[in-house]
Image: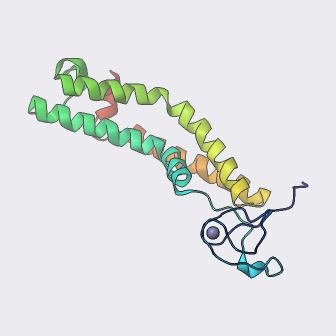
Amino acid sequence: MPSRPPIPRCIDCDYRLEGLVENRCPECGRPFDPMNADTFTIERRPSRGWLIATGFVWCYPLLWNLLCLFTWLVAWMHLGHPPQAWVDDPNSISSLVDVLVFISVLAIGFVPVALMCGFAANLWLGRVLRLPVGRQILMHVLFIIVWFAQLAIVRMDPTGTTMWLMD
Ligand SMILES: [Zn+2]
């Protein structure tokens, strides 16, 4: 697959080093030598925010389960006993539990969105890191395995939390 020539970037701050009068990064002042590939980088490093967002969608099912568990624990505190499916209606405990139940149920709707965002994030990461196609496919496969593992944990539902929320 042909790609346009990579643009050199500052090692320290990732600034694009093109069209400059002097061989010094205008952003942070780090000097570089256009003839010496050790003094600059052509790889774009993914920003921390994007990496956190990618991690978030990778772990979405488990994070959702943690949110449900939190809701369940708060309901437990308000009820004085562990909430049970078909016995303790999630919507008649307290207004705080109402809000948490609403967010938890709303978050289920975002599972397909998170799945799509995960694939998009993998594609983006593969591009930024210039990963070979094989590695990119491997990343998608790993992503699917990680998601299935999490969904399996959610399905086990040892505390009956999901059952209680969904009944
Ligand atoms: Zn710089």
Q: In x, y percent, where is residue 136? A: 72, 55
> Where 138 falls versus 90 (above or below)?
below
**From this viewpoint, which residue is outermost toward the left?**
80
Q: Position of residue 90 (x, y in %)?
A: 24, 22
Image x and y of residue 16, in percent: 72, 62
Give the quadrant of the N terminus.
bottom right
**56 left or right of 41 in image:** left
Quarter of the image where the C terminus is located: top left
Nearer the observer, 47 or 167:
47
Query: Residue placed at 62% from the left, 65% from the top?
Result: 27
Q: Residue at x 16, y 23 (%)?
A: 94
Q: Is residue 91 left or right of residue 50?
A: left
Residue 134 figure quarter: bottom right
Q: x%, y% of residue 21?
A: 78, 69
Picture layout, residue 108 above or below residue 63: above
* Ligand 1 placement by image quarter: bottom right
Q: Residue at x 69, y 48 (%)?
A: 123
Q: Can you say whether 11 is above or below 82 in the image?
A: below
**As drawn, is 112 to the left or to the right of 78?**
right
From the viewer's perspective, is residue 42 above or below residue 144? below
